[in-house]
Image (cartoon, rainbow, N blue to C red):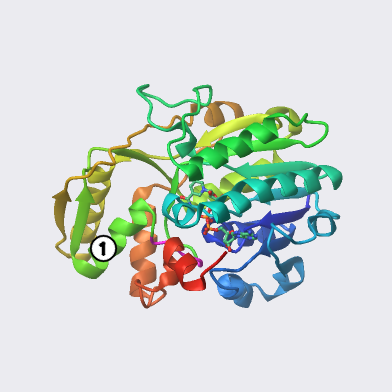
Amino acid sequence: MPQRILVIGGAGYVGSTLVPKLLNQGHRVTVLDTFWFGKAVFDEYLTKNLYRFRQLFMMEGDIRNCDLGKIMADADCVIHLACISNDPSFELNRDLGRSINYDAFLRVIDAAQKAKVKRFIFASTSSVYGIKKEENVTEDLELEPITDYSKYKAFCEMELRMIPAEKLPWVIIRPATVCGYASRLRLDLTVNILTMAALTKGKITVLGGSQKRPNINIKDMADLYVQLIKEPDEKIVGQTFNAGGENLSVMDIAILVQKFLQDFRDKKVEIEIKPTDDLRSYHVSSEKIKRELGWQVLFNMQDAIWSLVDAFEKGKIPNPDDPKYYNIKTMQKLNIS
Ligand SMILES: NC(=O)c1ccc[n+]([C@@H]2O[C@H](COP(=O)([O-])OP(=O)(O)OC[C@H]3O[C@@H](n4cnc5c(N)ncnc54)[C@H](O)[C@@H]3O)[C@@H](O)[C@H]2O)c1
């Protein structure tokens, strides 16, 4: 059934793929965003789907100070994606990071309860686990976040867990690192970084290489949020789910990119290995979400590599060094405080 969905941070990397999918399902979507990465993210979609214009509402606002009560008043479902969304950008200004990722999150969940939204979906992160010795990282393991970005995600999770389902029917998703092309593109994420380096320099530099990094294709990520809107309360409310596709080592990802370009573009790519102190390695298990929601990934890492190569060749990434593709560079350029 079509719903009124508020996507907070909906003009970001994940949102730019998710929102068109929601519109295609017939939902009415409001995007609340500061639009740090631009407002044009849905232009291509809307040009091809003109009749969806009336179903999309773009609202410029900052969750730290906008009137969330008013914005949420007619929302059935809220998907909360907005934050300072990686470690380096968070480290740039910790006070800012905390104010958006945690303090404003409290405003968001307070407003969501008052507005009586029927579903609240929170994008946490699989990095809340920190480094684990367990072979498979499952949802019941203790959270030992190492960085402030993941620490405040864990705090947000704790805040949600204190709210009874009848006050706010929440669900938490802990996604792996997302990969693949999107209209608001991030080139500061593992698979995307390695693919663009191969395409533009013919050389991939791997730091360490043995670290396992769980990944999820952006299309599967977006499909999951769409699915979460449809699931009955009894299956998801009050639940936390990991969501990841392949768990490959960084070196294996580099080899995959190298092989892809060799096989499909006859392009030689060199792999250079450099030492690193950051050997964080984890294997995230998505068995719970598969078992309980029948969730399946439909796209793999090659699909993500392919989508980036295709976009690059079609001129959709004209300047891969543009700060807009890198969260930390955008934050520095906009001097956000
Ligand atoms: N991309 C990944 O690999 C990944 C992995 C795990 C979890 N996540 C989580 O998924 C969510 C979406 O990630 P993404 O990659 O799309 O991030 P993103 O940085 O591309 O998008 C975040 C969006 O939020 C907006 N925003 C930031 N602060 C705001 C504020 N104060 N008020 C309103 N809007 C604000 C930004 O303008 C941006 O459009 C984040 O919560 C992130 O932590 C992402």
Secondary structure character of the magenta stretch overall: loop
Residue 48 position in % (x across, y down): 60, 75
Image quarter for residue 134?
top left
| Residue 105 shown in magenta | no
Residue 289 horizontal side relative to residue 325, left or right: right
Q: Residues within 10 Å of mark 1 (few under 14, many from 20)?
A: some
The quarter of the rendered structure image containing the C terminus is bottom right
Residue 195 higher or lower than 152, as above or below:
below
- For image coordinates 17% across by 45% down, the residue present is 275
Q: Examine the rendering and report whether any part of residue 120 can be seen.
A: yes
Q: Examine the rendering and report whether any part of residue 293 can be seen.
A: no
- For image coordinates 56% across by 70% down, the residue present is 41
Q: Label 1: which residue?
A: 197
Residue 65 horizontal side relative to residue 190, left or right: right
- For image coordinates 50% across by 28% down, the residue present is 143
- Magenta-tinted stretch: 183-187
Residue 255 position in % (x across, y down): 21, 49
Of residues 53 and 40, the one drawn nearer to the viewer in this rendering: 40
- For image coordinates 68% across by 35% down, the residue present is 159
| Residue 186 shown in magenta | yes
Of residues 56 and 171, the one drawn nearer to the viewer in this rendering: 171
Which quadrant of the figure shows ligand 1? bottom right
Tag 1: amino acid? Ala
Residue 28 higher or lower than 143, as above or below:
below
Residue 84 higher or lower than 169, as above or below:
below
